[in-house]
């Protein structure tokens, strides 16, 4: 790797590390950091797929709990980041390695359907292949140039290595899972271990109050904050926004203090798998050297519940969102946002 690559890590890698901070469950699964060797020059717009998985052990099938797309226009002047709801109902294509047929399901199931390996533990990297195909079908994005699979288990170590993260909190966020001192909340008598309950907790709960002044969140608070959706006006859509805000705060902190990068990467360690898309870190660095993290624009896509015969099936996008995806695929996001301020909104 050249001298400039030692001084600075490219945006796509910083986003991958930051996306690892979107931890929704404190369980670690080993994963290798994979960087493919260089093959060809990078040109045109770039699209990266960042996925957070929530497994319960190396032997369990992972679900894609967080799905983020980063789009960098051909002019390399900015980066757009948007989320896909984990419960988005989509058509998942057939997948030969696991023998699964095409089916309609929630998008987070694509990782699970693509991960099984005969005679071995599930492979998140194989699941990523099916998920990326599914996301491409939904969005019309022709290909993903690079990406990452994040095991959420390294979250608290990563945030601890950073010395915490400061974040302005845009609404009161009650914790479903933690007491004010960080210990787990008590479970209802009818929802003890082994009993399935949608909301099994009771008693005192941590509250993250609305604050325009950035608040420092320590490791457990950061984990807890990005998990929350219950008690929020827009539920999972508010959680998605908070995850994007947190990711932005992490990437800015890494950028402002490059000395933190090595211990943060070490903390991420076996919780992060990076797919280089056929290019080395040094190549990505040279291509993205002029990008500024200040120009990271996070976007809020509209969505609504999908009901069939009165039964909740998941989430759906209005038909108009396809016009945004077309703009991404055709690399004209900036003019689209100017022309459609009420459809796709910029996070504040």
Image (spheres, rainbow, N blue to C red):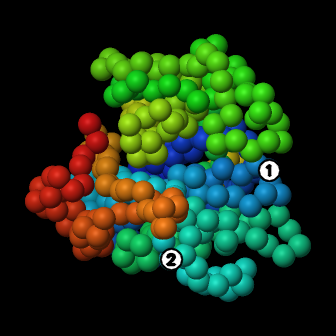
Q: Residue furthest top?
A: 181
Q: Is residue 25 above or below residue 76?
A: above
Q: Is residue 253 above or below residue 51?
A: above
Q: Nearer the viewer, residue 55 or 8?
A: 55
Q: Is residue 104 above or below residue 347?
A: below
Q: Residues within 10 Å of mark 2 (few under 14, many from 20)?
A: some
**Residue on which the image places disc 2:** 91
Q: Residue at x 33, y 42 (%)?
A: 293
Q: Residue at x 53, y 52 (%)?
A: 66
Can residue 245 be seen from the camera position used here? no
Along the horizontal axis of the image, is 237 left or right of 35? Answer: left
Q: Nearer the viewer, residue 35 or 301?
A: 301
Task: Name the image quarter holding residue 33.
Answer: bottom right
Q: Picture coordinates of residue 176 (x, y %)?
A: 58, 30
Can residue 204 be seen from the camera position used here? yes
Gap in Å between the C-alphas at discs 1 and 2? 27 Å
Q: Is residue 181 above or below residue 89?
A: above
Along the horizontal axis of the image, is 49 left or right of 197? Answer: left
Task: Name the image quarter holding residue 199.
Answer: top right
Total count of labels: 2
Along the horizontal axis of the image, is 246 left or right of 267? Answer: left
Q: Residue furthest right?
A: 119
**Secondary structure beneath label 1:** loop
Q: Nearer the viewer, residue 295 or 28?
A: 28
**Residue on which the image places disc 1:** 57
Q: Picture coordinates of residue 226 (x, y %)?
A: 51, 36
């Amino acid at each position: 790797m050249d001298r400039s690559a030692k001084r600075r890590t490219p945006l796509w890698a910083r986003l991958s590390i930051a996306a690892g901070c979107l931890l929704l469950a404190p369980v670690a699964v080993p994963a290798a950091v994979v960087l493919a060797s260089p093959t060809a020059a990078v040109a045109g717009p770039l699209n990266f797929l960042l996925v957070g998985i929530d497994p319960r052990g190396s032997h369990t099938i992972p679900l894609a709990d967080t799905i983020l797309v980063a789009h960098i226009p051909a002019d390399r002047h900015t980066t757009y980041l948007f989320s896909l709801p984990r419960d988005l109902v989509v058509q998942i294509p057939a997948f030969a390695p696991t023998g699964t047929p095409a089916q309609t399901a929630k998008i987070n199931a694509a990782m699970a359907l693509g991960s099984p390996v005969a005679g071995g533990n599930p492979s998140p990297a194989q699941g990523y292949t099916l998920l990326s195909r599914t996301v491409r079908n939904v969005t019309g994005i022709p290909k993903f140039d690079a990406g990452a699979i994040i095991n959420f288990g390294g979250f608290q170590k990563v945030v601890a290595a950073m010395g915490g993260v400061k974040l302005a909190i845009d609404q009161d966020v009650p914790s479903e899972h933690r007491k004010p001192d960080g210990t787990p909340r008590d479970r209802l008598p009818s929802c003890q271990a082994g009993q399935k309950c949608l909301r099994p907790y009771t008693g005192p709960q941590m509250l993250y109050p609305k604050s325009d002044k950035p608040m420092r969140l320590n490791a457990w608070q950061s984990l807890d904050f990005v998990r929350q959706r219950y008690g929020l006006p827009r539920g999972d859509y508010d959680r998605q926004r908070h995850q994007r805000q947190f990711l932005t705060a992490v990437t800015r902190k890494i950028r402002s203090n490059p000395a933190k990068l090595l211990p943060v990467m070490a903390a991420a360690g076996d919780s992060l798998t990076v797919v280089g898309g056929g290019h080395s870190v040094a190549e990505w660095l040279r291509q993205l050297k002029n990008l500024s993290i200040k120009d990271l624009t996070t976007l809020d896509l509209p969505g609504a519940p999908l009901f069939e015969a009165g039964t909740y099936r998941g989430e759906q996008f209005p038909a108009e969102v396809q016009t945004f995806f077309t703009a991404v695929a055709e690399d004209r996001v900036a003019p689209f946002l100017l022309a459609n301020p009420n459809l796709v909104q910029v996070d504040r």
